[in-house]
Amino acid sequence: MQELTREEVLTLQALEEAMWRADTRFDMRFMDAVLAAEFIEVGRSGRTYTRDEILALQSTEIDVDLPLTGFTAVAICEDVALVRYTSVPTKASRGEAHRTSVWVNDGRWRLRFHQATSTDI
């Protein structure tokens, strides 16, 4: 199997961390370019979000510690990467979640799927 280069891993980490920064998360042009047309998210609550719902989110404060904890990225097939990390709030005592994303490279990396699983169980 093809392995990701260090540059690809760093690019994917930068893209994931951009999702946690208000200046990029709520930038419609950035998000439109990064989210794949078929994007789906399963949030910490279990709720499913479509691409359109994510693009329509109103700007809000994002409480997360950066850089992302335990970040890893591996190739799962050619031009597809699986990213895993834990989101840890900086202010709240609860809200930590294990997160998994699938990124597809069609000439640029695009986020195809994201899922969060609460660790507060």
Image: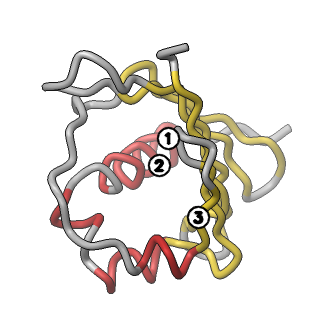
For label 2, count other residues whose C-alpha is less than 10 Å away and answer few (under 14), some (14-19) or many (20+).
Answer: many
Which badge, 2 or 3, comes first in the chain's sequence? 2
Q: Which element type, helix, strand or loop, lies under badge 3?
A: strand
The residue lying toward the viewer, choosing from 37 and 62, is: 62
Q: Position of residue 2 (x, y in %)?
A: 78, 42
**Compared to 73, does 15 lie above or below?**
below
Q: Quadrant of residue 7?
A: top left
Residue flagged by tag 3: what amino acid is it?
Tyr
Tag 2 secondary structure: helix
User: What numbered label is drawn on residue 9?
Assistant: 1
- Which of the marked residues, 1 or 3, is nearer the chain's N terminus? 1
Find residue 53 and report its horizontal and vertical position in percent. Answer: 50, 75
Gap in Å between the C-alphas at discs 2 and 1? 5 Å
In the figure, 5 relative to 56: above or below? above
Q: Which residue corresponds to mark 2?
A: 12
Q: Are marks 2 and 3 in contact (CB under 8 Å)?
A: no
Q: Which circle marks residue 49 in the picture? A: 3
Q: Nearer the viewer, residue 56 or 6?
A: 56
